[in-house]
């Protein structure tokens, strides 16, 4: 007898994350998507052997993820509905051996399929796993203040990162690699996935201008926390601007001393440390 998948840690984590993202206003309507890499040991107790519900073709090659399991949000599904109906709004999928399809093993019970951003998610998983064997989560949302900042702030990655680092003392510690930014592109395409994945090699936070943000991490909590921290900094920036702008800030020297104290290495080329202020 299988255990009830609705009681699994991973379904509960997906319910909590989607509910929180909705509550914070970052995933209106069908906005946002999450994919969470699971091990065979995690999913096995909840599945009926090798039974698959449906097989869905993909138009790109994910063969380096063949046999891997993910729980993912559904295409066109609303985060606000996940808690009450996880079996319709979430799906447990496994990438087929040829990397060209995925099997649905549980969920998407109304005939649904995985998020429209699956190419970006899988390409990002491939890239993060190549640099971090503990990587597990890709999360996309329309974080309000970060999105707004892509209209009012320079889209130079280094300038953007520096502004966020300055807005809360914790930021440089939470995302020392800063944020990366791709050009505006049509979502849901392989092309935007490829562009995002290039950036994912060096940064775990990628902005899609005038759209939203992608985060990567080793757990749901950590990935959520990463996006939450950057979004908080963007909110503070918004308030600072509305109050008339900065009169003082955290200096580059102070940012470097934070990095030293917390033993992180800030992305190169952002802090200007002349011999005088080193
Ligand atoms: O799933 O957010 O980027 C809806 C989106 C697409
Ligand atoms: Zn989106």
Image (spheres, helix red, strand yellow):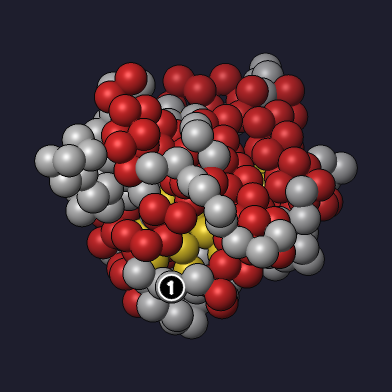
In front of the other: 152 or 49: 152
Seen at 57% across and 67% down, the residue is 149
Q: Does the image show residue 190?
A: no
The local crowd at label 1, few if under 14, some if 14 to 19, many if 20 or more residues have their Cα within 10 Å, is few
Q: Is residue 6 above or below residue 64?
A: above
Task: Determine the residue located farthest toward the left in the rendered image.
Answer: 275
Q: Does the image show residue 151?
A: yes
Task: Locate the C terminus and report the quarter of the image it occupies.
Answer: top left
Q: Provide residue 73's location: percent of width, then percent of height.
A: 63, 52
Seen at 66% across and 23% down, the residue is 8
The quarter holding residue 180 reads: bottom left
Tell me the element at label 1. Answer: loop
In front of the other: 175 or 208: 175
In front of the other: 113 or 161: 161
For the image shown, how many numbered marks are present on the structure? 1
Instruction: Report which residue position mark 1 lands on.
Output: 154
Q: Provide residue 30's location: percent of width, then percent of height.
A: 72, 65
Seen at 27% across and 48% down, the residue is 271
């Amino acid at each position: 007898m299988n255990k009830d998948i609705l009681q699994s840690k991973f379904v509960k984590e997906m319910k909590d994350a989607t509910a929180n993202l909705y509550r914070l206003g970052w995933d209106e309507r069908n906005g946002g998507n999450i994919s969470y890499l699971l091990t065979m040991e995690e999913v096995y107790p909840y599945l009926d052997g090798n039974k698959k519900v449906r097989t869905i073709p993909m138009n790109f090659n994910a063969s380096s993820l063949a046999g891997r399991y993910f729980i993912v949000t559904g295409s066109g599904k609303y985060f606000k509905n996940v808690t009450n109906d996880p079996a319709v709004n979430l799906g447990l999928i496994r990438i087929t051996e040829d990397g060209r399809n995925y099997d649905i093993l549980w969920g998407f019970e109304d005939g649904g399929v995985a998020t429209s951003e699956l190419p970006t998610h899988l390409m990002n998983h491939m890239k993060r796993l190549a640099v971090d064997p503990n990587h597990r989560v890709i999360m996309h949302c329309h974080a309000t203040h970060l999105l707004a900042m892509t209209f009012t702030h320079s889209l130079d990655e280094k300038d953007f990162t520096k502004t966020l680092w300055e807005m809360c003392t914790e930021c440089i510690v939470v995302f020392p690699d800063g944020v990366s930014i791709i050009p505006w592109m049509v979502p849901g395409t392989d092309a935007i996935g490829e562009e995002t994945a290039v950036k994912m090699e060096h940064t775990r936070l990628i902005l899609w201008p005038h759209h939203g943000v992608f985060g990567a991490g080793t757990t749901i909590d950590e990935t959520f926390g990463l996006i939450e921290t950057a979004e908080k900094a963007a909110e503070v920036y918004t308030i600072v601007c509305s109050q008339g702008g900065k009169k003082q800030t955290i200096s580059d020297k102070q940012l470097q001393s934070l990095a030293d104290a917390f033993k992180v290495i800030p992305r190169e080329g952002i802090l200007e440390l002349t011999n005088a202020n080193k």
